[in-house]
Amino acid sequence: MFFIEKCRRLIEEKLGWGKSETWQSTDFENLSDRIFEETSSMISSSTLKRIWGKVRYDSKPNMATLNVLAQFTGYENWRAFTSAGTQIVTEDIKETKAKPAIKFYVKWLLTGAAVILLSIVVLALLKKTDNHIKIGKVSFSSKPVTSGLPNTVIFQYDATDSNADSVFIQQSWDTRQRFKVDKQLHEYTSTYYVPGYYKAKLILNDSVVKQNDVYIETDGWVGLIETKPIPIYLPKSVFENKRQMGITEKVLAHQKIDFSQELPVFTLTNVDKGIDLSSENFLLDAELQNTFNDNSKGICRETHIAVLGTEGLIDIPLCKSGCVGEIGIMLGMKYINGKTINLSGLGVDFERPVKVHCEAKNGRIKIFVNGNTGYEDEFRQNIGRIVGFRITFRGTGVLNSFDCRKS
């Protein structure tokens, strides 16, 4: 466990996100994305939580996971990482052991050194004989079978020219949506239940070799209530009228959702790959209100406005002023944590509708709440082309107006 702890410490120092004790779920999702970006290998946020002790799990991480963590810290693999750290271990042992037993421990250290040297030699020999993945001519494409939700996507692939033992197709960044496919076949179907933009991946053994854009588009705005494994899709007549879009607690009761036991999550999503907007220069205006009144579950009235892009997303959170320490802004790959950055400008009184204005221009992004500056920062690494928007209410809420245009 010493080396795992050391690896965690190195990653924390590299990220500079503060003490891991204060990390939230979004931080581990961001770390998962960072690891994939640098190593082309995915470790899910749930696995990272287990490694950091956020979730009780008695088993050790598997070697594939350890290799990826080592690569993220700059080493070739886990063996190289632990070999580099052996000197630290032996020095610690020398300093803490009593002198009367020095002969025994010197002998132990010499034996350990011999084992390590032998391991390095074996590793070198294995490297020479190891058959690296031969990718060859690999193809990967996708096409939705229909419009609307849910939607099945047909993936066409050809990995027969590679020497990989295993072939996988992964729906998105989420490794839980990874499925093993027959290397000798060329077609696989997968069902998407939530609208959005996804980067599907073709994986040979543990290596991502191809990615493909998957658009699960909507016909205007769609409303759904998040439930697992399949969300509840709401008819337009339920969530939309001439004045606004949204739901009430009566709608939840009609859908037989027991919101006294679990806080419901209601989303409005609009995805269209034909949106002709760059995330470098845009203006967004929205007026919305979280209307949930159950103080036992939804006391913070957390609400999010998300801009979906081909290279990430912008997520603007709102909540009651007393809860701003529990939220965070997502700007592409950059996460602004409310525990370490003052986000009090995003605290609101949802007793009346809230007006939000966001503008990105000249490498900066500004967020205004009810006419006041909520947050301002650099925005050099944009999220590519804008392909959609998502409004999320923890509880119930209404969207009175929404507009996004070129600045």
Image (cartoon, rainbow, N blue to C red):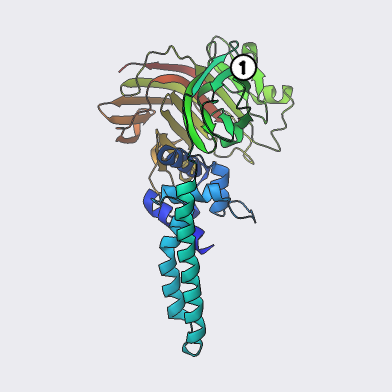
Question: For residue 394, which quarter of the picture?
Answer: top right
Residue 398 location in percent, x, y?
55, 22
Left or right of 219 in this view: 296: right
Does the rendering let one see residue 69? no
Residue 181 seen in render: yes
- Tell me: 254 left or right of 96: right
The image shows residue 389, relative to residue 298, as above or below, that is: above
Question: Dot 1 surroundings within 10 Å: few (below 14), some, or many (20 or more)?
Answer: some
Across and down, in percent, residue 40 comes to 45, 37
Rendered view: 287 above or below 209: above
Q: Residue at x 31, y 21 (%)?
A: 281
**Which quadrant is home to the N terminus?**
bottom right
Q: Residue at x 43, y 44 (%)?
A: 338
Q: Residue at x 44, y 57 (%)?
A: 81
View extreme (bottom): residue: 100
Q: How many marks?
A: 1
150 relative to 349, above or below: above
- Whole-percent x and y of residue 96? 46, 80
Q: Which residue is mark 1?
A: 151
Q: In the figure, 369 relative to 270: above or below?
A: below
Camera-side residue of 107 and 324: 107
Label 1 is placed on what type of residue?
A: Asn
Q: Nearer the viewer, residue 5 or 320?
A: 5
| In-front residue for pair 186/70 | 186
SS at badge 1: strand
**Quarter occupied by the C terminus:** top left
Left or right position of 152 against 319: right
**Depth check: 20 or 235 in front?**
20
